[in-house]
Amino acid sequence: MNASMLGDDRRNWALAILDWTVRRLRPALGWVTFLSALALLLLTVFAVREARWVNVARYGVSPEWMVLIGLPLAWFLVHRSQRRTGVAGRVVNALLFVLWLGIGGAVTSQVILGWMPSPVRLQRVAATADWPGLLNEILAQWTSWGWRLQQWWLGVQTGGALQDDIVFLTLAAATLWLISGLTAWLALRTRSGLLTALPALWTLSLVLYYGNGQRYILITALALAILLHLWLDQRNLEAEWQRRRIDFSTALIVDRAGVVVGITLLVLLVAWVIPSPRVEATMRWAYERLAPVYAPIEETGKRLFPDLERPLRGHLGSGIGDGLPNRFLLGAGPFLSQIPVMWVGTNRTFTSNLTDFYEEPSLRFYMRRATFADYDGAGWSNPTLLTRGSVPAQRNWTDAAWTERVLVRQWVRLADASTLLYATGEPVEVSINYQTTQRSPVDLVALWADGEPVNRYDVVSAAPSVNEEMLLAWPGFGADRPLPDDLAIHLALPDTITQRTRDLAAQLVTGQATPYAQARAIEQYLRGFTYDLEVSEPPADVDVADYFLFDLQR
């Protein structure tokens, strides 16, 4: 009996401590309002990750901390500022605002750079008394960060900014900090759920519109905003009723919430069941009407981050992607194959009486938009610092001589205008003024229209002009023919390549004497996989090549 009573007392003490903690730390307007606003902001962070403008995981950045720290701090400071009036109060509030911005800068630097040493690191430094070394390391991180920001800004001013993912992540983190503060200010000043949710919804809509996110994120955010508005509206009504001393039932919020949730579920169910018709003429009309609205925004984005991956506009994208299948293709069904995206004519014609004539290239040309060099286990990318150049119309972008190739002229017409120029083989010149993105003077990444997007252009490419016997006879690079230094990047492999992937590659090329024979053996093996668009994305913690070869196999 005594033990049972003692157990009950302990449980009561635990509940009492928990209750005291919740009440003591209770934010203004209550936990429901605060947690709802926090959830809306975290949905925005999730949408930024889903947009895949940059590979956030690659840089070890956690933008969630900008919200998890920014919102509580702003909530506390705004609540405190409401108690101050007069000139002195305004001065104090202005100082608190400057303090909040300063803390935001410190948090942003920590999220991006991770410069603050961990307790374990501090313990090691204390044991060796290497405080100057730690300070120099921190200063080096800050100096490098500042230099990147400076170089990016100079590029923006001169119209030739280079894509820098760290700069983009810095601006994204700062934006999250600012909308966290604005959300707290609107919540405590207006006590309106829709106005409180406005910064998160606006940012979320822009991210989803210009990114690759799923619609369910926006639907979830809208439902959460409606429930937040309902909750704050009920709180305002109860405060008014209490002021007027009108009797009311506290369970009224349950009835109102039930009605709102029921209507929301009904709308979602109807939206799920009713088919979504696709009318090409209507879509084009909508794009034309919206073009004056989003065109200036896109132009600003291109000026700030010229190589940032961007989503579709119509059927063609304007970014170079990550070398993996586009998400809009997976699970899209066969109707996409019926939608033309481009029309291409060439100066090559079929000659049926030619046999083993190596100067006649294959009639099947593959159009490319970009090349990649860095594989990190999650996708393909390019080095951060790429060389950009402007080339006049009908001029070669390089002086390199393409051997065993023939020139193929293509007349290209795109269904939707694009700044990214498609071509077969190795493009060498374009009929319009164009820009190049290069890893080296002989290693092209992509070609871009110099100016507005275009839907018609001519391009001359150097297409391979060899037969299979010539390819089999080519010995590859070696001591007698070393690989150029500019192309060595294409042979680098990350540590994420699994041992079974290496073993499979070694098994497939066993007995194959030349590079082409090895590539053909690998191709024949891969052609044994089933071609299927109904596949899900690979898990985030696996090497995509390993997942494709051994788990997915289709």
Image (cartoon, rainbow, N blue to C red):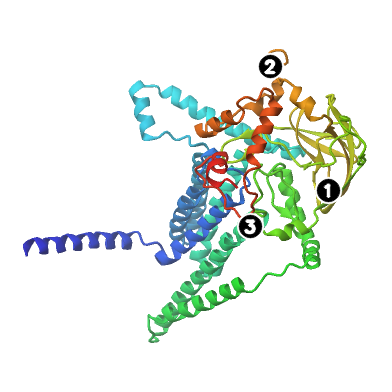
The extreme bottom residue here reads 247
Q: Amino acid at mark 3?
A: Gly
Mark 2: secondary structure:
loop
Residue matched to label 3:
331
The label nearer to you, 2 versus 1, is 2
Sequence-wise, which precedes: disc 2 or disc 1? 1
Q: Residue at x 72, y 12 (%)?
A: 480
Determine which residue is flagged by label 2: 478
Image x and y of residue 356, in percent: 86, 30
For mark 2, does the 10 Å Cα neighbourhood hold few (<14), some (14 to 19), or many (20 or more) residues? few
Q: Which residue in the structure is indicated by mark 1?
A: 452
Residue 345 vs 148, above or below: the answer is below
Q: Quadrant of residue 127?
A: top left
* Residue 62 visible in the shown view: yes
Residue at x 53% of width, y 63% of height: 186
- 33 up-or-down from 309: above or below: below
Residue 331, percent from left and from top? 63, 57
In the figure, is residue 329 to the left or right of 178? right
Circle 1 SS class: loop
Local crowd size for mark 3, using a 10 Å CA cut-off: few (<14), some (14–19), many (≥20): few
